[in-house]
Image (cartoon, rainbow, N blue to C red):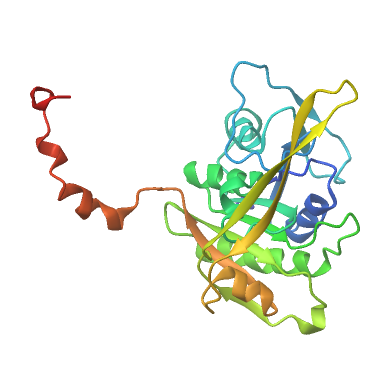
């Protein structure tokens, strides 16, 4: 019986320390293939490349004997190219990361790391995005590596419900203080952005985005609470964006009965 096929992606670029840690975490769980951007793509969300050519280059020896390819596209492009052009069968698992910085709460919307995992889910591949809450260049991925391996093993063994994937965030913490994994929901939070006006050497205005993270709840069932209290958060995510709880209310508006002759 063939080994599981594992696709490894990220948004920080193929040379980032986090993807190297992720490769080490899962390399002996199956036949691994890395497909990642040729440069950082943080904050790209679910962007895809339209109107420009996509380039793919093999990177021999970058991860030892594991095949690796860098692309000129976004994280989502990487998954699409892998599924359509590079791999010879559907992966049994997609893992994305390990991201430099949190993708908990509202950050999941903007994250290229998570969008690669979402694209895997759309393709019917059990998918997980991993993020470490440390933006430092010297971030220690030792704990994240162990967690990524444990979660990847569990997903390979148990599978995931159709239409879902996992968002796993790991706190920046001394391993002796780590309290374990906590299944949680996405916390209510947002970014309050400000655009600072600056001047270039020619005196022309440009804008630099800054902002503050605003957490709007402190409940113990959320990912942000888990991360602040020594746990790694595991949030099941779906890509069906329908607000199912709002359907009945909209139907009560009677929109189905509106017709052009009513004055559109």
Residue plotted at (75% across, 58% down): 28
Residue 80 in which image quadrant: top right
The residue depicted at 74 percent of the width and 57 percent of the height is 101
Look at the picture and state if 185 lies above or below 78.
below
Using the image, determine if residue 234 lies above or below residue 117.
Answer: below
Look at the image and tell me whether residue 260 can be seen: yes
* 87 shown above or below 244: above
Comparing 206 with 2, the one in front is 206
Location of residue 142 in the rendering, given as x and y in whole percent from the top left corner: 83, 67
The answer to which of 216 and 162 lies nearer the viewer is: 216
Among the 4 quarters of the image, the one containing residue 139: bottom right
Q: Position of residue 68 (x, y in %)?
A: 78, 38
In the rendering, at what x and y percent does residue 199 appear? Answer: 83, 30
Query: Which image quarter is the C terminus in?
Result: top left
Give the residue drawn at x 48%, y 43%. 122
Relative height, residue 93 to residue 15 (above, below): below
- Residue closest to the far front: 203
For the image, the number of numbered tags is 0
Describe residue 233's horizontal placement relative to residue 59 as left or right. Answer: left
């Amino acid at each position: 019986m063939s080994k599981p096929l594992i696709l490894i992606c990220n948004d920080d670029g193929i040379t980032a320390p986090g993807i190297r840690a992720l490769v080490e975490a899962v390399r002996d769980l199956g036949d691994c293939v890395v497909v990642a951007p040729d440069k950082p793509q943080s904050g790209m969300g679910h962007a895809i490349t339209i109107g420009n050519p996509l380039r793919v280059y093999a990177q021999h020896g970058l991860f030892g004997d594991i095949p690796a390819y860098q692309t000129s596209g976004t994280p989502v492009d990487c998954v699409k190219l892998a599924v359509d052009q590079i791999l010879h069968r559907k992966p049994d698992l997609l893992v994305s990361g390990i991201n430099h910085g949190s993708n908990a709460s509202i950050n999941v919307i903007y994250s290229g790391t998570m969008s690669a995992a979402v694209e895997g889910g759309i393709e019917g591949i059990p998918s997980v995005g991993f993020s470490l809450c440390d933006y430092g260049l010297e971030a220690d991925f030792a704990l994240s590596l162990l967690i990524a391996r444990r979660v990847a093993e569990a997903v390979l063994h148990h599978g995931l419900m159709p239409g879902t994937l996992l968002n796993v965030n790991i706190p920046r913490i001394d391993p002796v203080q780590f309290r374990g994994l906590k299944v949680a929901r996405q916390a209510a939070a947002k970014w309050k952005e400000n655009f600072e006006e600056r001047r270039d050497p020619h005196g022309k205005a440009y804008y630099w985005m800054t902002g503050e993270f605003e957490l709007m709840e402190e409940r113990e069932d959320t990912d942000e609470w888990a991360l602040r209290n020594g746990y790694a958060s595991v949030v099941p995510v779906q890509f069906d964006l329908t607000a199912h709880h709002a359907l009945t209310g909209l139907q009560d508006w009677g929109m189905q009965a509106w017709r052009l002759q009513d004055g559109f």
